[in-house]
Image (cartoon, rainbow, N blue to C red):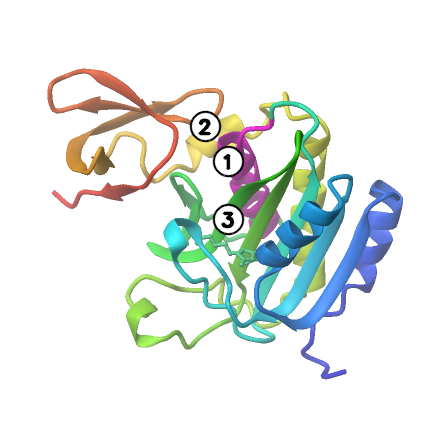
């Protein structure tokens, strides 16, 4: 195997210790770890697995966007598990964002910020994204948390160059990063009521206090981001002075 390929030996050991009943699947290339996780969960709603790829040919983001996933320079993985209680995708996304920013800070000293709801930024460029999706099979529900991190990618397609960046960590082990993110996130998956991520989600938000725009029923609204609630929903004051709760969708930061 190419030395730059992802070696997940240590992650396998961590999973065996922390989560003995979970499966670990590793691909050198796949279309999308989220798509694959969802297909497997449809066949087996009891499946608990971590699916990791060295590259994705059709990595997916929110709102039908692509997630650029070249070989050897990024970390792309999905966790899939049965949603035994009411696991909302909003708090899962927020918990995953905090897991990534804590792991990155621990390993590199670089402090990411979170652009609600699922983007992680460094120097105002997106370096990581999260896509949580539910899978419904009869009366069973599984959740998929997909995480993509640009570890050392330095060349992006033209349409991404202005907005995408990377951690610029050429010698950071992606296996170690995977392990740290899973180590942060798995306790939350095991105890979804735990809101220990909330304080970091607020502190490292690049949105709170800012003027923002959001789309509501096809109409752009403007206002100020005030706070997050315990589920990670954004509380915003609109231009009429009313406080609204945004639990989905996308916001744009306004440059004043
Ligand atoms: C976004 O930017 O809107 C979310 C990006 C999520 C990308 C990750 S990479 C691993 C997993 N598989 C996918 O196809 N997408 C997620």
Residue highlighted by disc 2: 232
Tell me, yes or no, whether the highlighted magenta stretch contains residue 141: no
Q: Secondary structure at mark 1?
A: helix
Determine crowd level at label 1: few under 14, some 14-19, many 20+ residues with C-alpha closer than 10 A. many
Which residue position is annotated with label 1?
94
The quarter of the image holding the C terminus is top left
Is 210 placed left or right of 74 in the picture?
left
- Whole-percent x, y for residue 74 in the image: 56, 67
Spatial CA distance of label 1 from label 3 is 9 Å
Q: Quadrant of residue 138?
A: top right
The residue positioned farthest toward the bottom in the image shown: 2
**Mark 2 residue element:** loop
Q: Nearer the viewer, residue 205 or 106?
A: 205
Residue for point 52% across, 42% down = 97
Please say whether residue 124 is visible from this viewpoint. yes
Q: Is residue 2 above or below residue 131?
A: below
Is 94 inside the magenta-drawn segment?
yes
SS category of the residue bearing label 3: strand
Residue extending furthest top? 242
Magenta stretch: give its range. Answer: 87-104
Label of residue 130 in the image: 3
Mark 3 surroundings within 10 Å by alpha-carbon count, few (fewer than 14), some (14 through 19), many (20 or more)? many
Cβ–Cβ under 8 Å for marks 1 and 2: yes
Main structural element of the magenta stretch: helix, strand or loop?
Answer: helix
The answer to which of 83 and 72 lies nearer the viewer is: 83
Give whichever of discs 1 and 3 has the lower sequence position.
1
Residue at 43% across, 37% down: 204
Q: Quadrant of the N terminus?
A: bottom right
């Amino acid at each position: 195997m190419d030395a730059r390929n992802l070696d997940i030996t240590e992650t396998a050991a961590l999973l065996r210790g922390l989560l003995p009943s979970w499966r670990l699947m590793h691909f050198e290339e796949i279309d999308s770890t989220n798509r694959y996780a969802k297909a497997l969960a449809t066949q087996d709603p009891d499946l608990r697995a971590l699916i990791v790829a060295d590259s994705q040919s059709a990595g997916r983001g929110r709102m039908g966007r692509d997630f650029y996933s070249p070989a050897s320079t990024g970390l792309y993985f999905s966790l899939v598990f049965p949603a035994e209680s009411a696991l909302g995708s909003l708090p899962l996304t927020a918990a995953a964002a905090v897991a990534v920013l804590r792991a990155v800070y621990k390993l590199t000293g670089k402090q990411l910020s979170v652009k609600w709801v699922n983007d992680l930024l460094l120097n105002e460029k997106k370096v990581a994204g999260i896509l949580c999706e539910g899978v419904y099979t009869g009366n069973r529900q599984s959740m998929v948390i997909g995480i993509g991190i640009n570890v050392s990618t330095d060349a992006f397609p033209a349409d991404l160059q202005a907005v995408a960046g990377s951690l610029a960590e050429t010698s950071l082990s992606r296996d170690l990063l995977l392990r740290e993110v899973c180590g942060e996130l798995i306790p939350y998956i095991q105890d979804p009521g735990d809101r220990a991520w909330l304080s970091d989600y607020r502190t490292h938000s690049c949105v709170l206090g800012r003027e923002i725009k959001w789309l509501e029923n096809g109409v752009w609204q403007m206002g100020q981001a005030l706070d997050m609630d315990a589920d990670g929903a954004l509380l915003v004051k609109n231009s009429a002075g009313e406080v609204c709760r945004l639990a989905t969708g996308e916001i744009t930061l306004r440059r004043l």
